[in-house]
Amino acid sequence: MKAFVLNELYKYPELQSTTFPTLGDDEVYIKINASSINHRDLWIVKGMYPGIILNTILGSDACGVSGENTFVINPGLFWGDNPHCQSSAFQVLGMPSPGTFAEHIAINQKYLYACPAHLTEIEAAAIPLAGITAYRALFKRALVKKEDKVLISGIGGGVALFAMQFAIAAGCEVIVTSSSDYKIAEAIDLGAHAGYLYTNPDWYKELIHDFGGVDVIIDGACGQGFNNLVKTCNPGARISFYGGSAGKIDGLNPQTIFWKQITIAGSTMGSDQDFAEMIDFISEHQIKPVIDSIFPFDQITEGFKRMESSLQFGKIVFQH
Ligand SMILES: NC(=O)c1ccc[n+]([C@@H]2O[C@H](COP(=O)([O-])OP(=O)(O)OC[C@H]3O[C@@H](n4cnc5c(N)ncnc54)[C@H](OP(=O)(O)O)[C@@H]3O)[C@@H](O)[C@H]2O)c1
């Protein structure tokens, strides 16, 4: 079968013939009809991810068929029994195990979920990794509730957009940040109340002036900008972060955090239970993932370039 394989670091995966996967215990074959890229795939290409193994098929997200049925794959493998954190055996599909940028995959049936009826295969393939990360960060770690004011940073990101859609569906008032006026306008079209350019050093003052402060923050960047997020917190606020795209946080003021009783919670993907709940939530609220662009399977490297440009608003999906 054909698949995109990471042969060298700093070089996009290459389309080549690979051996057809063999079935392990409880595994079935899925013919992949759509997949999507996450920043993880790009970090791996750039050598900025732990445990990189060359000659691996990349890709964590997919929607595909087995027999008559269409499935979405949960890419969080071996989470284990503890709902609070993953086991030491936890892996993300697409390194070390062969990923979804392929024609077929062999996968344990327990990671298969019926494709929500209101979604196309393209839309469903956009969900898994970003969707589960947003769901857990928002509902399980930041304990968001109806009518909370929720700030979501870097709204152009895949996870950020799911967090925004989920928070709006949960009845929250959502405020976003971005480096782009265009992306803020798009977010407002989708139901956000307001947006601020995080490239303006005084953006947080404007937010405080306009809204007073926020109850929940979902962040994937960290870095120096994290300090400005903390300044927008109402007393008792919860910050959940799932990424560190902008690097380490220097100069965090402990007094602000303990005096305002702020909770800062790290979050990574989600348990099997979280994934099942997320799929149900998407069906219940008829949520449609925001798709930035669709490339044919043989042009997966164009999707890597698009993500590297940071121009995307929503998920970059591949039609197989
Ligand atoms: N822990 C986990 O389970 C988990 C899961 C998924 C992702 N992640 C991590 O989370 C991060 C985002 O992943 P993704 O797949 O959503 O990536 P993505 O779709 O490529 O989104 C990246 C977005 O980050 C925003 N951004 C960049 N620098 C920023 C800054 N200084 N302040 C605020 N926002 C900034 C940009 O938003 P604008 O374009 O709006 O400026 C950009 O569009 C990555 O580091 C990824 O590795 C972790």
Image (cartoon, rainbow, N blue to C red):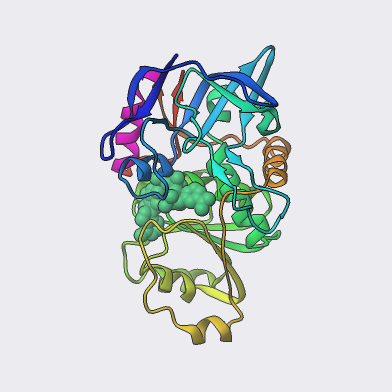
Give the quarter of the image for residue 15. top left
Most common secondary structure along the magenta stretch: helix
From the viewer's perspective, is 122 left or right of 70? left
Residue in the foreground of this view, choosing between 111 and 255: 111
The residue sitting at the left extreme is 10
Quadrant location, the N terminus: top left
Residue 188 seen anywhere in this rendered image of the structure:
no
Residue 187 higher or lower than 239, as above or below: above
Residue 318 seen anywhere in this rendered image of the structure:
yes
Q: Is residue 216 magenta?
A: no
Residue 39 x %, y %? 41, 44
Residue 65 x %, y %? 62, 17
- The region drawn magenta spans 296-309
Residue 78 higher or lower than 25, as above or below: below
Residue 78 x %, y %? 63, 43
Residue 209 higher or lower than 28, as above or below: below
Residue in the foreground of this view, choosing between 303 and 214: 303
Q: Is residue 298 magenta?
A: yes
